[in-house]
């Protein structure tokens, strides 16, 4: 435990670095928030939801078709969606005024997809970035929506997906770099100059095992300082990989967690450790990172089989010494796992239908199930404590599944379902 806690101390260093790149502490500027961990710093929120759930402050249409969540910076929020254009549909990066909910601008990203966009925009230093479902990476001015530069994963990097549901990654901005996962033979991961789009490095991926498929996965990159080396970690078609931030050197790969259908959840760094998971009958693992010569190696601490913990959609969060998330293929059974040992502290009853996107805020976990249910659980290893449920209305424009991740900002809970955004008051009045 002592060695793990020493590694965990580095998490605070990473957090400080991530909150000093051009946005306020209260902003939610990208996928899974400012620290990429789906942990909100909001306090004073409702500890229990009343019957019927918290009060609905407002709802709006106009986000288009898609699973993208929202990024909030200042008085604006940003998302992506497929909208009508020129007699058909196109995929757009969109900005709205947070108070009036009026659309401020839209920037065309690329062709539409059957059920829309997947990427949550990243906002940094006056620019906003998005990845279209066909692999179109765009950078636009946050104030006006004017395109600054664009790249194509397929044309510029020989990119490919592991399977047919198209690109779902949300881009990472780290300092002056924009880091992404085209999935190409010579560019599994790439770093670009965030202001110009110029390629800084490309990382080819060696063979790491036979499980899974070649190409990018449906996950997004996180930053680890494991073994004292700044590195970019993500889940691709063949498993978890790590690339050195400084120069794009491939560091390590872990194949056992891969499946051949869709590798989806975002990994969670914890000091010198990485927790990862995948569904379709696969499972979860904790990896220990160690320095070896001029590289880093990853050693498996434990592997949990699919019956113990597999995460399909929605991800998981690290709160204290425990992992919380939704367990099961096409399911979101609440589960709490001790990070160090892999011991299951508890499992609860499924509180909604299908998988669950998970967010932590003020001592509690918000589970957004893929149909319409939302549940509040206390984040404690002492047992599964359900603190309230409600369902979002079935409005026109809310067809299909709701896989968009929830966001808590300024005492409000934001939940997107396709074209509609719901805003709930989650602070006591």
Image (tube, rainbow, N blue to C red):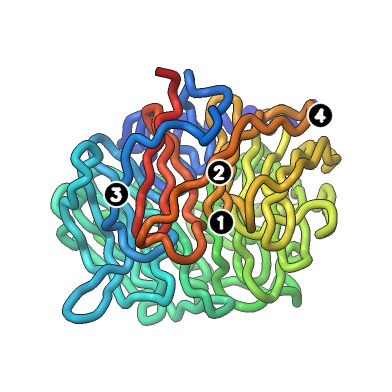
Task: Give the distance between the C-alpha atoms of the residues marked 4 and 1, in whole angstroms.
Answer: 36 Å
Asked if residue 161 is positioned above or below residue 328 in the image, the reply reads below
Element carrying mark 4: loop
The spot of residue 155 in percent (x, y) is 36, 81
Task: Tell me where residue 428 sits by quadrant.
Answer: top left
Mark in front: 4 vs 2: 2
- Mark 2 and mark 3 lie on one chain; the one further toward the N terminus is 3
Relative to 244, is 54 on the left or the right? left
> Mark 2 — residue?
374
Task: Give the distance between the C-alpha atoms of the residues marked 1 and 3, in whole angstroms.
Answer: 19 Å
The spot of residue 397 in percent (x, y) is 36, 62
Task: Give the distance between the C-alpha atoms of the residues marked 4 and 2, in whole angstroms.
Answer: 35 Å
Q: Residues within 10 Å of mark 4 (few under 14, many from 20)?
A: few
Task: Give the distance between the C-alpha atoms of the residues marked 2 and 3, in whole angstroms.
Answer: 18 Å
Q: Which disc number belongs to residue 60?
A: 3
> Mark 1 — residue?
370
Mark in front: 4 vs 1: 1
- Mark 1 and mark 3 lie on one chain; the one further toward the N terminus is 3
Q: Residues within 10 Å of mark 3 (few under 14, many from 20)?
A: few
Q: Residues within 10 Å of mark 1 (few under 14, many from 20)?
A: many
Mark in front: 3 vs 4: 3
> Mark 4 — residue?
1
């Amino acid at each position: 435990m002592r060695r793990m806690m020493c590694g965990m101390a580095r998490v605070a260093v990473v957090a400080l670095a991530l909150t000093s790149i051009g946005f306020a502490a209260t902003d939610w500027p990208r996928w899974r928030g400012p620290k990429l961990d789906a942990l909100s710093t909001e306090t004073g929120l409702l500890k229990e939801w009343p019957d019927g759930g918290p009060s609905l402050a407002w709802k709006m249409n106009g986000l288009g078709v898609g699973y993208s969540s929202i990024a909030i910076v200042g008085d604006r929020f940003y998302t992506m969606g497929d909208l009508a254009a020129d007699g058909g549909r196109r995929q757009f990066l969109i900005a709205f005024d947070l108070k009036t909910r009026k659309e401020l601008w839209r920037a065309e990203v690329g062709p539409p997809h059957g059920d829309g966009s997947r990427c949550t925009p990243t906002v940094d230093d006056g620019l906003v970035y998005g990845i279209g479902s066909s692999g179109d990476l765009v950078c636009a001015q946050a104030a006006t929506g004017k395109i600054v530069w664009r790249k194509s994963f397929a044309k510029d990097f020989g990119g490919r997906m592991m399977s047919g549901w198209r690109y779902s990654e949300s881009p990472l901005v780290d300092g002056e770099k924009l880091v992404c996962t085209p999935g190409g033979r010579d560019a599994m991961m790439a770093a670009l100059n965030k202001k110009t789009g110029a390629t800084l490095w490309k990382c080819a991926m060696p063979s790491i095992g036979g499980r899974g498929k070649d190409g990018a996965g449906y996950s997004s990159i996180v930053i680890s300082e494991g073994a004292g080396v700044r590195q970019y970690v993500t889940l691709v078609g063949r498993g978890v990989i790590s690339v050195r931030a400084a120069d794009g050197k491939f560091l390590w790969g872990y194949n056992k967690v891969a499946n051949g259908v869709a590798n989806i959840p975002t990994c969670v760094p914890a000091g010198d450790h990485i927790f990862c998971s995948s569904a379709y009958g696969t499972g979860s693992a904790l990896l220990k990172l160690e320095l070896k010569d001029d590289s880093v190696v990853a050693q498996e601490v434990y592997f949990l089989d699919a019956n113990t913990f597999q995460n399909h959609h929605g991800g998981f969060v690290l709160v204290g010494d425990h992992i919380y998330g939704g367990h099961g293929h096409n399911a979101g059974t609440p589960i709490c796992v001790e990070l160090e040992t892999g011991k299951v502290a508890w499992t609860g009853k499924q509180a909604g239908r299908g998988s669950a996107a998970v967010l932590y805020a003020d001592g509690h976990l918000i589970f957004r199930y893929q149909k319409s249910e939302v549940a509040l659980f206390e984040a404690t290893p002492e047992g599964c404590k359900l603190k309230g449920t409600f369902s979002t209305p079935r409005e026109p424009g809310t067809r299909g599944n709701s896989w968009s991740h929830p966001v808590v900002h300024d005492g409000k809970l934001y939940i997107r379902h396709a074209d509609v955004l719901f805003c709930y008051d989650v602070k006591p009045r």
